[in-house]
Amino acid sequence: MLVLSRKHNESIVINDNITIVVVDIRGDKVQLGIEAPKDVSVHRREVYDAIHGITAVADAPGSQAVLTGAIRRHSAGREEPTA
């Protein structure tokens, strides 16, 4: 893992087409701005894990009932799956 230090308004460039900028720093939180091509997916880790978790569930036997339950929980405002 490459570890870099950046200050407010400083940036990091990846592959000439992705730029990450430190937009704001407040206490222990850092707000980042990310510019990337539309074909590059950018997600927070918890969203990425949820997407891939649902994909894995969709491929599993009996997934219809599990996915239906997940959709109902999400619609009811409870996004955390029960396992």
Image (cartoon, helix red, strand yellow):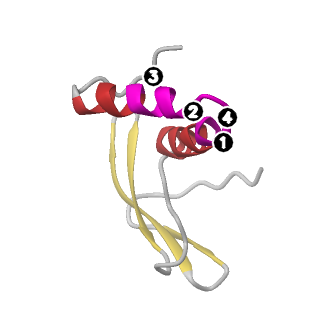
Q: Which residues are magenta?
A: 56-69
Mark 2 vs 4: CB contact within 8 A: yes
Give the amino acid at mark 3. Pro
Of the numbered discs in the image, which one, if any, rests on residue 60? Answer: 4
Determine the secondary structure under disc 2: helix
- How many angstroms separate mark 2 from mark 4 (CA)? 5 Å
Determine the CA span between mark 2 and mark 3: 13 Å
Q: Which residue is mark 3?
A: 81
The residue that label 2 is drawn on is 63
How many C-alpha atoms fall within 10 Å of the one at disc 1: few (<14), some, or many (≥20)?
few
Q: Residue 57 in the image: state x and y as whole percent.
A: 60, 35
Image point (59%, 45%), residue name: 55
Amino acid type assigned to the residue bearing label 4 in the image: Ala
Task: Tell me which numbered mark, 3 or 4, is placed earlier along the sequence.
Answer: 4
Give the farthest residue toward the top: 83
State the residue position of label 1. 59
Towards the viewer: 74 or 13: 74
